[in-house]
C-alpha cells in the first residue's frame, strides 16, 4: 500500500493531522518552558499551574472553538454545491435552469433591498444605537446573514429548477457535506487545545487580528484537508 494512498484517505488524513497537532502541542509546551526559564513573559505548561489549567479547561477549550461558524459555513457550501446553481451559470445550462437562476437572482435582489431598508434610515434596525455601522448588528452578524442569504437563494434555485423535488431532498442536500466533514472532528478537537495553549502561554495571545486570522485559517485548512479529494 503506497504512501499517497494512505495519505489520500480522509480517515488517514485526519489521523495524520491529529499526530501533527499533538506534536505541535508538545512543541508549545517545550517552547513556553524554555522561554519562561530564561526570564521571558511566557507562562509554561510544564508546571503545576500549567497542568492544572490543561486538565480543568479541556472541555472549555473545545467549546471555545468556532464550531457554529464552521457548521454554518459547511452547510452553506454544501447547499450551494448540491443545488446546482453554479452549473446554471455555464453555457451548458438548460432553459429551466436559466429561468430558475433568474428567479434566484430576483430573490437575492429582494434580500439586498430589505437590507438597505434596514440600514439607510437614520434609526435603522441594523445600525448601532449611535446610528453608525461600527459595532452594529450588521457588523456583528454579517457572517450569519450572508450564509442565510446564500442558503435561501440556493434553495429557491434548486426547488424551481427541479433539483429538489421533496422535503427529503432538501434536508439531505443541507447535510451532504457534513457527512464528509465528520473525519475532521478529532483533529479539530486537538487543534482547539493547541490554540488555547498558545493563548495561555502568551505565545500567541487571543484577541489580536493576527491571532484571529491564524486560528480561522487553521480550522478551515483542517476541514479542507480532511474533505478534499486527492488528485
Image: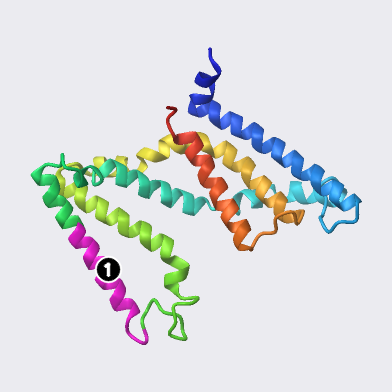
Tell me if residue 113 is in the magenta stretch: yes
- Between 148 and 63, the residue placed more toward the observer is 148
The residue positioned farthest toward the left in the image shown: 95
Q: Is residue 161 visible?
A: yes
Identity of the residue drawn at 81% across and 42% down: 30
Q: How many marks?
A: 1
Tell me if residue 83 is in the magenta stretch: no
Residue 64, image x, y percentages: 60, 54
The colour style of the image is: rainbow
Identity of the residue drawn at 86% across and 46% down: 34
Residue 160, image x, y percentages: 15, 49
Magenta stretch in the rendered image: 105-123
In the depicted structure, whether residue 205 falls above or below residue 123: above
In the depicted structure, whether residue 40 falls above or below residue 45: below
Residue 223, image x, y percentages: 50, 41
Image-based side of 124 in relation to 139, left or right:
left
Q: Mark 1 packing: few (<14 Cα in 10 Å), some, or many (20+)? A: few
Quadrant of the image containing the C terminus? top left
Identity of the residue drawn at 10% across and 45% down: 96
- Between 91 and 63, the residue placed more toward the observer is 91
Identity of the residue drawn at 26% across and 51% down: 154
- Per the image, label 1 sits on a secondary structure element best described as helix
Residue 219, image x, y percentages: 55, 46
- Residue designated by label 1: 112
In the depicted structure, whether residue 114 falls above or below residue 188: below
Image-based side of 85 in relation to 178, left or right:
left
Amino acid at each position: 500500500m503506497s504512501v499517497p494512498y494512505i495519505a489520500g484517505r480522509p480517515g488517514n488524513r485526519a489521523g495524520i493531522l491529529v499526530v501533527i497537532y499533538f506534536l505541535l502541542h508538545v512543541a508549545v509546551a517545550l517552547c513556553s518552558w524554555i522561554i519562561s526559564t530564561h526570564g521571558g513573559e511566557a507562562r509554561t505548561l510544564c508546571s503545576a499551574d500549567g497542568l492544572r489549567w490543561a486538565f480543568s479547561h479541556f472541555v472549555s477549550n473545545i467549546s471555545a472553538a468556532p464550531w457554529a461558524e464552521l457548521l454554518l459555513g459547511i452547510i452553506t457550501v454544501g447547499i450551494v454545491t448540491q443545488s446546482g446553481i453554479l452549473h446554471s451559470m455555464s453555457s451548458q445550462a438548460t432553459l429551466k435552469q436559466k429561468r430558475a437562476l433568474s428567479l434566484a437572482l430576483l430573490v437575492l435582489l429582494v434580500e439586498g433591498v430589505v437590507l438597505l431598508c434596514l440600514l439607510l434610515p437614520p434609526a435603522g434596525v441594523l445600525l448601532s444605537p449611535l446610528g453608525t455601522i461600527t459595532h452594529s448588528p450588521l457588523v456583528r452578524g454579517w457572517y450569519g446573514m450572508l450564509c442565510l442569504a446564500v442558503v435561501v437563494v440556493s434553495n429557491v434555485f434548486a426547488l424551481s429548477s427541479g433539483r429538489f423535488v421533496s422535503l427529503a431532498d432538501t434536508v439531505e442536500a443541507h447535510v451532504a457535506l457534513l457527512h464528509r466533514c465528520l473525519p475532521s472532528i478529532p483533529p479539530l478537537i486537538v487543534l482547539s487545545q493547541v490554540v488555547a495553549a498558545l493563548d495561555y502561554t502568551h505565545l500567541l495571545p487571543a484577541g489580536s487580528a493576527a491571532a484571529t486570522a491564524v486560528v480561522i485559517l487553521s480550522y478551515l485548512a483542517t476541514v479542507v484537508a480532511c474533505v478534499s479529494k486527492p488528485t
